[in-house]
Image (cartoon, helix red, strand yellow):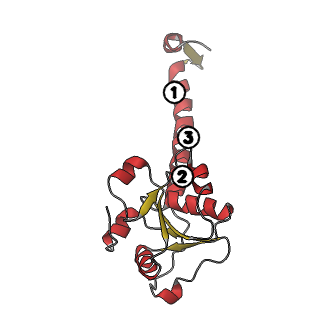
Amino acid sequence: MPNQAYIFATFKIRKQNIIPFFLLIRIRTMKILNHFILIAAVLISISCKSDASKSGEPDTTTANLVTPSQNSVKNVSAEEAKTLMLDNPEIEILDVRTPAEYGTGHLKKSANVDFLGSEFLKNIENLDRNKTYLVYCAVGGRSSQAAQLMQKHGFNSVYNSKEGFSALKKVGIEVD
């Protein structure tokens, strides 16, 4: 493969027209780069979304906050999470953001278990699988993934806050 200086100096002749060879290379490279950027953008947007249902207004009554069935995750709004915390003072709250994010503010009585950290699986292995957990992150993506992972590891009752820390704070849940 010729080096860049050689590409700029090389020309390809086609039917009396002189077309700079570097221009052809650049056009092909840009097409590949555009495809890569498009794929990356789609993957990022998918990973940031929670897999919560898009139903109408949430009903925050305790009757609707049924305990998740054996090994399932229940996605809840910020209002539902608040009701859940008030009705179940024994609930364990897990903040799966990074320690830096946790340091800028977190829900009272929450434990930081960094989903992106190398010790995440080891940390959840040490948790009691029979307790009820509310998992949250910044916007709902990591907590959804963490809750699903907890489900796969045999946790019986896991709630995922599909809206994240800012929404939880906004509905009046106490923060430190």
Instruction: Sort mark 1 into few (<14), some (14-19) or many (20+) by Cα contacts within 10 Å.
Output: few
Disc 2 residue type? Val
Name the residue rendered at 50%, 49% in the picture.
41
Q: CA distance from mark 3 to mark 1?
A: 15 Å
Read off the residue under disc 2.
Answer: 42
Q: Earlier in the sequence, mark 2 or mark 1?
A: 1
Q: Earlier in the sequence, mark 3 or mark 1?
A: 1
Q: Is residue 17 above or below residue 5?
A: below
Q: Relative to 58, is 14 on the left or the right?
A: right
Name the residue rendered at 58%, 60% in the picture.
127
Q: Is residue 153 visible?
A: yes
Q: CA distance from mark 2 to mark 1?
A: 24 Å
Instruction: Sort mark 2 into few (<14), some (14-19) or many (20+) by Cα contacts within 10 Å.
Output: few
Element type at marker 2? Answer: helix
| Image quarter hosting the N terminus | top right
Residue 110: where, in percent of width, then height? 42, 62
Disc 3 residue type? Phe
Read off the residue under disc 3.
Answer: 36
The answer to whether marks 3 and 1 mark residues whose Cβ atoms lie closer than 8 Å is no
Q: Is residue 19 visible?
A: no
Q: Is residue 63 above or below residue 90?
A: below
Q: Is residue 45 above or below residue 118?
A: below
Residue 126: where, in percent of width, then height? 60, 56
Please tell me the numbered disc located at residue 26.
Answer: 1
Disc 1 residue type? Arg
